[in-house]
Amino acid sequence: MDKMANPYRRRKGQGGVWMRDMMQRWNGLCNFGLHYRLRCGVRGFDRIATEREYARDRRFRGTGVKKLSFPRSGLRTCSVAPFTIQGGRAMIHHRLTRVAAFLASGVAASCLHVAPVQAQESSYSFDIPSQSLGSALRKFGQITNQQIIFSESVVRGKRSAALVGAHSTDDALRRLLAGTDLHVRRASGGMYMIEGDRSGAAQLSGNVEAAAEDNIVVTGSRIRKASTDTSAPSTSLGAEDLSDRGYVQVGDLLNDVTSNAPAFPINPTKGFPAGTGQTYPNLFNLGAGRTLALVNGRRMVSSASGLGDRVVDTNVIPAGLIKRVEIIQGGGAAVYGSDAIAGVVNYILKDDFEGVEIDLQNSISSRGDDWRPYARLTAGTNFAGDRGNIAINLEYSKTNPLLDYDRPWTDLSPILVTNPNDTGPDDGQPTQIYITHPRYRFHNKNGVIFRPSGSPPFFATFLGQGRDLFQFSADGKQVIPYDPGEYYGGSASSIGGDGLDWREVSTAATGVERYTGTAVGHFDISNNVRLIGEFVYGHQKGTDPYGTQAIFRTLFNDYDGGAGLIPFDRTNPYLTQDAIDGLDAINPAFAAGDQLYLGRIMDILPTRNRASERDTWRALIGLEGDFAVGDRSFYWSLTGSRGETSGFIEVGAGYATHLNNALDTTSVGGQIVCRINADADPTNDDAACVPINPFGDVKASPEALAYATVISGARYKNVQDDLLATIGGGLIRLPGGLAKFSIAYEHRREYAALTPYEVDQLGLPDNCCESVPSKESYNTDEISAELLVPIIGEDFTLPGVRSLVADGSFRFVDNSIAGKENVWGAGLRWDTGFGLTFRGSRSRNFRAPSLDQLFAPISVSNGPIGRDPCDVDSIGLGSNPAVRRQNCEALFAANPGFGPLGTFQDPAENTSLALITTGGNPTLKNEVSDTWTYGVVVEPSFIPGLTITADRIEVNLRQGLTAFSPANFLATCFDSTDYPNDACSNFTRNDQGYIVTANQTTFNAAVVKYHGEVYNLNYRLPLERVFGSDLGTLEFNVEATHTSLALSNATGFSEARTQGTVGDPDWRGRLDVRYSKGPFRLFYQLYYLPEVMNTATSTVENDPTPTIAANYRHTISVQYEMSNLTLRAGVNNFTDEGPSFPTRAYGDLYGRQFFIGAKMRFQ
């Protein structure tokens, strides 16, 4: 390098001048918050130039000078040598030659305005594996914000001891230096100096306020700034939170965040599939599609099947590499784009790891089931003289499925039936009551016998109606009495009897098995340019043992479609003579040749498991760096990524045509054969048909099962290509500080494909409908800009205004399908200087329609319609019951065949009678929301360690993307004063008034509002303050979310307010308490759900449980850390409290769970 480029180079004969100049410049450094780094190439160490020097001296240009920001209050750093930015925290370290070491004490002494040294009792939580001592000291500085002076020549070749747990700064340094023959000394300015020539470590009194500014990119903005300096409310979780709770999946940790609606792989409704085991963040219960999930501030490919919503399953996130999880509550679309309506969840992974770490854990319930093994291997190393680092993380975990029988609260299986004691609307008795351990009244595995009566769908009644009822014996050879149980009406269930037990068809929770593999790395190409790379892979397998309930052949199913009751007559060759004689005696018409019918559940599927598997990966490569122009420094990044999710979901299903062929049998020469192969019509012959005995719980042959059943399902694939370029930095110096900006350009392509299995494309399962393959894509080009303006701050302050900072953001979106959108955000943060900070933000956010909502192929299937507004149970409901009744009266007056309105009941509400047509809507536009947040941060100086935040959040969404179900179309039709309207053309009725066809699609019609507050209290109390000796440290965290308004209106006529109900409790609260002393840590958590209404309209007259009891979950754990080993154990839900009756999700479904784990570290 040219000598003129080094103004600090000592020239021969100028030692005194050089020394005086150096000290003058150093004193200047202490008076500035902005410093610059200059790598001079002289004797292997760096120099520092002040801002004024840089501005006036052109010799600094092009020399690699970089900016480092320090706070304006508290610590004024006085140090010589380069800084590095690692792990997001700026830090100065020192490569001192002998001359620099000689100067250190003078330098420190010259900074007379250094703040007091941090109190000795302060401690920090460390997780630093054994590694090169220089790297370990830098990590120590990142955690503690302490300044350390050391010479690279002194630490070169030495390795640190591992440091884990909570320690004071002094104790932590001693532990790091153990076995190195080096010692630590406190300089008069409060800085730590690492020395090799002293016999001990001299401890000097004083305090240093650890207030070094975090120059990192904080979630909610791409501008580098302090992590606490945000105008929008935010919260953060770390790896410690995972280990304390015994969690091995990030989704479980998110469920503890009170602003997030908990998502578990559980079945909220018995008798239906429990799902695939995927979990997604869902802030404020506005829907998972309205919470944007990021990995390291960048988008991740969607995990949803087929053309589903853009959501990221937490199973793919590597728990072992979690550095922290940052959550911005309310908005964020102007910075990150679509889907940030409720907020943003950013999973930040560790990017610098050295050594090898093995983590093993297992857990078991107090009932001896629900084993949950977990294993993790993390390994990393520096290379190229610490210019690069690469780390890999491999994880495995498994959660077994849970059946209804497995827990007392799900074993109850409560279901609503008619209350026989209800005499009217004002008698204090609900119209319905719960029964437990219900059984299906109309069928079982043996076959309940019916005789024809009436017309479809209820065309049959019990054989022996009014007398004894009958069924076949388990072996199918006899007709025996059937006990239907105690029946109250209002459902198909009864108490006791011989019907099918509900629990035999219900999975309480899906099992999830997951593998993840992650690699992260970086390499410093130069002092100003870094190459980064990430690869994330996850494999997930979901298991729902009763996801397919077997084949139901009941009077509620579509008889004409071949899925209803099973017909038989006396010629059926499987009937024994005893059975024929019994049936003749019971029903003379049968003896004359008439048919009877069977109501049966046929457990003949190849599998009842609803299986799902998915592979997700994302590969990212990019460059990032910084540069200087004039007296300003800038940072930039350019990344490109591709992500892909591929998987399948499959279930066993009946092939209705083949099954009916196999059930319709005759005898030819004493051999039982399918009737189609024995009749006179050769065109319907099927040599593969194998007869099935319909009587009793008799197992069919494998050949018969292969003929009568199929595996139904679909494969799906999502692909995301993303290019992101950003640039930012200082813009202009104002009296209040440096104004900063960030500009980003993003191009993204989303592609999704859904390919049904061939049997589904042919419409074979249940003789239903043909499924159509689909594949669609869109691309979007987006430009965003942010500006941060310090109006007041640094040396320019006013009484009661230490700082006043405004920020703004804008994003232009050009979506190839949904069109153009402009969204923006603005915020203000006012620090009074008295431990009180006010903040607020206003933003406009958006969500683009998903490919499923736009292009879902047209499909037709049988299913229930939900509520028919004219049904006797629904006519008094809705947004305007009087209008609803008036319109229904007009309908029934015009159609007298429907019968009297006062007794009308539509069986299509709860049975699969209607043919429902589903498809996408390519005319959809973006949904848009307006969000306000405003709050306060309290940090009283008279209570050190206490921080309290309280923020109000208001989200008002319009033209919301909403799935219009048949029930929505029906409500829109009958609740409108404009009757009949267009919505009425989306369904039809038969001659009896039952709904027989209906449509289902998506519209921009919803109005959604959320208003609430988020509260957070953090308090850290070193017990030495109270007792005068080091007894450890107590930490308290209280988090609470209050919901004052949760309103949704999907149709414009069906406003629903759900605040204070099970879905949106008015409060959620969590208390965390940690006690730590040295290597020991004790943790306790209380998660609280208050007493709530079951529904917003629940009363003692219409709901047997109008209020749901409060719920409490307690967790306790203990951890002990040794040099290379950490042991932990704990109990989740140690009071074994289940969900509040009669829910499955208002509380912990799994019950008391013990866990034990160990983490081992190696060099």
Image (tube, grey):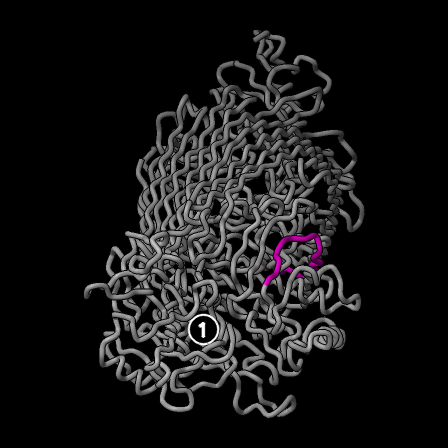
Main SS, magenta residues = strand
Quarter where residue 244 is shown: bottom left
Is residue 285 in sight in this rendering? yes
Would residue 97 appear left or right of 581 to someone viewing this image? right
Q: Residue at x 39, y 85 (%)?
A: 485
Left or right for 619, reference 961: left
Residue 421 rendering spot, x and y as whole percentages: 54, 92
Q: Quadrant of residue 571?
A: bottom left
Q: Is residue 1013 magenta?
A: yes
Q: Secondary structure at mark 1?
A: loop
Return the residue found at the far left. 670
Question: From this viewpoint, is residue 144 visible?
Answer: no
Q: For residue 1067: magenta?
A: no
Residue at the spot 33% in from the left edge and 50% down from the top edge:
374
Front residue of 958 and 788: 958
Q: How many marks?
A: 1
Q: Is residue 654 above or below residue 380?
A: below
Residue segment shown in magenta: 997-1016
Under mark 1, the amino acid is: Leu
Quarter of the image where the C terminus is located: top left
Where residue 1078 sits in the image (x, y, percent)? 39, 52
Q: Residue furthest front?
A: 680
Q: Position of residue 204 (x, y in %)?
A: 50, 42
Question: Can you give x and y, in whole percent of width and height, for residue 299 in the image?
Answer: 56, 39
Q: Which residue is mark 1?
A: 555
